[in-house]
């Protein structure tokens, strides 16, 4: 079943060579498709076409990170607060005063570049220390809101009393035991000399593999769907070999 | 809104004053930091430690301070009000977030710098791979120029100094390099992993130990449990009652909720406790490598 | 007599040391055939996805939902289907929504055309931007944005405009003075921006998650502890949402409604690709065992 608009039809080629630059045009899709094929050529073997696309990719990605730093961080979060903005009635923007003390951030952050200097290398630890300190300060909040509800949920009724039915109690018991046993695997603080601890930590390792198995399974799904989506992009959106969604 | 007393009210005319004030601050800080480089070496450690501790303290206060609900007209908002300090503590947090992002942004530039160093070296030494380095540097430069130009054009449009029609070329150029090149390459690069997983599964996923067997069995059940066609295998079993437990989708759900969840939680908790301990060690200045060698 | 085990060994040896490019080729062929000619498959809906669907489907006309859409083309295969199904549900239920994004400044431009296209479909009640939904757009600062929304939702998005006026003055934000007035926050993401919501939401409203399958392992524990009202996992989750849409608006009663898109479309290639993977593991293991038996190792 070949589609009328497909790559085997003259219309496809006519459309391509119109060099239409509107978003979603065949010409633009072709650019992306060629780059995709460039990366996929690695599957056959390492080659120049692949290396070319790979370097284009790294270059674009690095370049975009510079652009993103300027337009999303330095300008809105440093320059604008430092310089303020005058009121603009036509746009309905209120005046924002200039907090010129923000200027101090620039030399402070630039201390990081001393990392290349032997003599003053220690100065680069000040900006890094500030960032690490800010991160560390957030951990209390993170622990309370992310992990405590998880621990609380581990406290489950394991006796079939009241509303808890027998299957529920068994499930809960499994949940609680799995948790404790896997935790015991992570006891590194002292040597696990007792036979009991050695056994539980062995079982813990097995149960850990259950978790890893689940993660492995879902990871494969994501990667395959990404490839299927790329195949859709190449075969349907670019070559138009089948019915689109 | 006024966090600092040190502000200048802006009008369209006084931009030079604001800029001058900022430059003076930059200059003064530079001198101050230059002074720091002269302090005796036994003072360096406590100094860095102090910076670390104070930055952490701001967030700890945010966590510890009580919040109150404030009704202003139609809007309810939550504010962190403390005695003596007349403003909402959230304002401090907003500044803090700016500080951390600006700092990390500039430090990220270090990474870009080292990429530039490596590739410029290759180009000037006439390395065998010099061509690819030129490609990399070229596409990087193109992205930076097009990206910033497009951004400036957009900003000018926002204040009415230009029109989208006048900037059509640059907008199109940016959307080509971003949407049709970078984004597509990103997706293609990550989809390549599917192939490597397939090849690794064939070569390395072997039933050699109990652990590997368990992992493989679970991965298999989870995979099949997510795939509608595979569910058809056990669709013959009743939907209710004891036998329904052996339907593949129910086995998958049971494993995910009752086995992998507590196992992953235990890992998470171990990780969380580790991070918490490390955070405290960092704040107190006893973690090696931050303030202490 | 000697030759027979010799040939058998050779088969397993060949299989054991097969060039990986043959595997790649088989995968490409299998996926290509099924992408061009997909097979329609039946579905059994995952309870975690149904949980989110039921909650959203139970909302009343005029309720408000806050959406944070963080996906880009790099996770399009999974996120787009989820996003489209969510939009269809909310529009058919006439639930108001506001969308913001954290991951990337281009996201609003990627998703706006999708929303507008779905709004034109039959059953979508001709949803209008500024009337039934608004785009709060891109926020560069994760921390400040999420904390800001939780502390004071109107203040956090008041600078964003639609047709010359602030989006909080549009009918969409009528009666929404605090995040607790929203019935739910739904996060559609391919990255870990959801962690910030766990840390900062302070149980003000319900939280729903639509994520890529690779993220599901780490996030299912939050569903079990009820920090999430539901979790929609990968392309299968999108298919679940599509199936539930088709159950609520069946094709024989609503013939011109679109319920199924990429979720169902990607299911059959995914199934055969994964079957190939499982087959590869099985063959690899049998080859190993056979080689061990005959005492030869490659």
Image: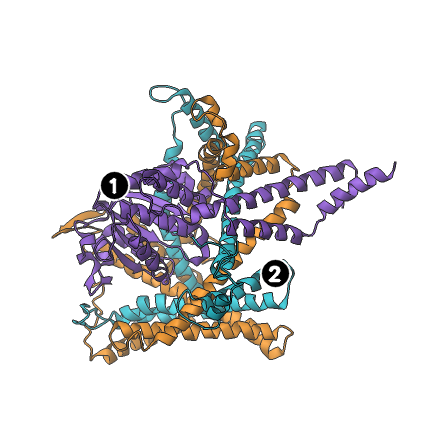
Chain colours: A cyan, B orange, C purple
Please give the chain letter of the residue carrying mark 1: C
Residue to which mark 2 is pinned: A42
Image location (x, y in percent) of residue A51: 59, 67
Residue situated furthest right in the rendering: C1
Residue situated furthest left in the rendering: B73
Image location (x, y in percent) of residue C50: 36, 38
Mark 2 Cα within 10 Å, few/some/many (few <14, many 20+)? some
Mark 1 Cα within 10 Å, few/some/many (few <14, many 20+)? some
Q: Residue at x 27, y 68 (%)?
A: A81
Cα distance between the residues tagged 2 and 1 = 49 Å
Q: Residue at x 40, y 59 (%)?
A: A131
Q: Is residue C25 above or below residue C7?
A: below
Image location (x, y in percent) of residue A241: 51, 57
Residue situated furthest top in the rendering: A161
Q: Is residue C283 above or below residue A135?
A: above
Residue to which mark 1 is pinned: C59
């Amino acid at each position: 079943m070949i589609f009328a608009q497909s790559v085997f039809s003259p219309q496809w080629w006519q459309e391509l060579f119109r060099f239409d630059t509107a978003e979603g045009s065949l010409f633009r899709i072709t650019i992306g498709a060629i780059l995709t094929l460039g990366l996929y050529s690695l599957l056959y073997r390492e080659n120049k076409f692949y290396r070319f696309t790979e370097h284009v990719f790294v270059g674009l990605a690095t370049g975009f990170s510079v652009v993103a730093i300027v337009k999303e961080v330095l300008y809105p979060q440093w320059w604008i607060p430092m310089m303020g903005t005058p009121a603009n009635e036509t746009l309905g923007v209120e005046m924002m005063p200039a907090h010129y003390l923000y200027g101090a951030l620039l030399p402070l952050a630039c201390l990081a570049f001393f990392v290349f200097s032997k003599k003053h290398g220690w100065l680069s630890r000040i900006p890094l220390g500030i960032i690490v300190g800010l991160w560390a300060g957030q951990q209390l909040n993170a622990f309370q809101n992310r992990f405590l509800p998880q621990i609380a949920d581990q406290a489950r009724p394991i006796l079939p009393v009241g509303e808890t039915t027998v299957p529920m109690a068994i499930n809960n018991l499994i949940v609680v035991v799995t948790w404790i046993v896997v935790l015991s695997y992570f006891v590194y603080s002292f040597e696990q000399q007792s036979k009991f601890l050695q056994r539980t930590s062995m079982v813990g390792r097995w149960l850990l593999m259950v978790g890893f198995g689940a993660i492995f399974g879902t990871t494969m799904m994501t990667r395959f769907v990404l490839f299927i989506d790329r195949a859709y992009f190449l075969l349907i959106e670019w070559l138009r070999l089948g019915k689109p969604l | 809104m006024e966090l600092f007393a040190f502000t200048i009210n802006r009008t369209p005319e006084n931009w030079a004053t604001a800029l001058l004030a900022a430059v003076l601050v930059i200059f003064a800080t530079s001198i101050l930091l230059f002074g720091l480089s002269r302090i005796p070496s036994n003072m360096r450690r406590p100094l860095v430690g102090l910076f670390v501790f104070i930055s952490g303290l701001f967030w700890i206060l945010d966590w510890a301070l009580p919040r109150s609900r404030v009704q202003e007209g139609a809007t309810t908002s939550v504010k962190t009000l403390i005695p003596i300090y007349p403003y909402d503590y959230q304002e401090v947090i907003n500044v803090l977030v700016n500080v951390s992002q600006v700092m990390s942004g500039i430090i990220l530039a270090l990474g870009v710098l080292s990429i530039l160093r490596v590739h410029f070296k290759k180009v000037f030494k006439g390395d065998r791979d010099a061509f690819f380095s030129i490609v990399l540097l070229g596409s990087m430069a193109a992205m930076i120029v097009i990206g910033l130009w497009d951004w400036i054009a957009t900003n000018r449009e926002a204040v009415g100094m230009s029109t989208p029609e006048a900037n059509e070329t640059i907008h199109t150029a940016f959307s080509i390099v971003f949407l049709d090149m970078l984004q597509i390459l990103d997706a293609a690069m990550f989809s390549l992993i599917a192939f490597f997983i397939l090849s690794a599964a064939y070569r390395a996923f072997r039933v050699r130990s109990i652990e590997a067997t368990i992992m493989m069995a679970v991965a298999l059940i989870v995979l099949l449990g997510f795939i509608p066609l595979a569910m058809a295998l056990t669709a013959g079993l009743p939907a209710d009652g004891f036998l329904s437990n052996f339907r593949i989708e129910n086995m998958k759900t049971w494993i995910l909720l009752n086995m992998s969840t507590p196992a992953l939680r235990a890992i998470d908790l171990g990780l969380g406790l580790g991070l918490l301990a490390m955070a405290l060690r960092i704040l107190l200045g006893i973690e090696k490598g931050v303030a202490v060698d | 007599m000697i030759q027979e085990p010799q040939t058998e060994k050779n088969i397993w040896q060949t299989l054991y040391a097969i060039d990986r490019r043959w595997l790649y080729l088989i995968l490409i062929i299998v996926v290509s055939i099924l992408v061009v000619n997909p097979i329609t498959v039946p579905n059994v809906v995952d309870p975690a996805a149904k949980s989110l669907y039921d909650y959203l489907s139970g909302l009343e006309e005029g309720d408000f939902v806050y959406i944070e859409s963080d996906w880009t083309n790099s996770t399009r295969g999974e996120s787009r289907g989820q996003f489209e199904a969510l939009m269809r549900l909310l529009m058919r239920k006439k639930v108001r929504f506001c969308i913001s994004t954290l991951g990337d400044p281009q996201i609003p431009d990627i998703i706006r055309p999708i929303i507008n296209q779905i709004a034109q479909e039959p059953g979508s009640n001709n949803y209008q931007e500024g009337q039934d939904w608004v785009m709060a757009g891109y926020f560069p600062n994760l921390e400040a944005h999420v904390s800001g929304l939780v502390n004071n939702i109107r203040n956090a998005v008041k600078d964003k405009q639609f047709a010359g006026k602030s989006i909080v003055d549009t009918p969409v934000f009528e009666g929404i003075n605090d995040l607790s007035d929203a019935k739910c926050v739904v996060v559609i993401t391919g990255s870990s921006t959801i962690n910030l919501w766990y840390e900062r939401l302070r149980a003000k409203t319900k939280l729903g998650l639509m994520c890529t399958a690779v993220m599901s392992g780490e996030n299912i524990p939050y569903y079990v502890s009820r920090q999430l009202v539901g979790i929609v996992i990968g392309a299968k989750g999108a298919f679940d949402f599509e199936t539930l849409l088709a159950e609520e608006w069946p094709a024989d009663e609503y013939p011109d409604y679109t319920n199924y898109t990429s979720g169902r479309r990607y299911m059959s290639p995914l199934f055969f690709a994964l079957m190939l993977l499982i087959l590869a593991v099985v063959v690899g293991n049998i080859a190993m065992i056979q080689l061990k038996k005959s005492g030869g190792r490659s």
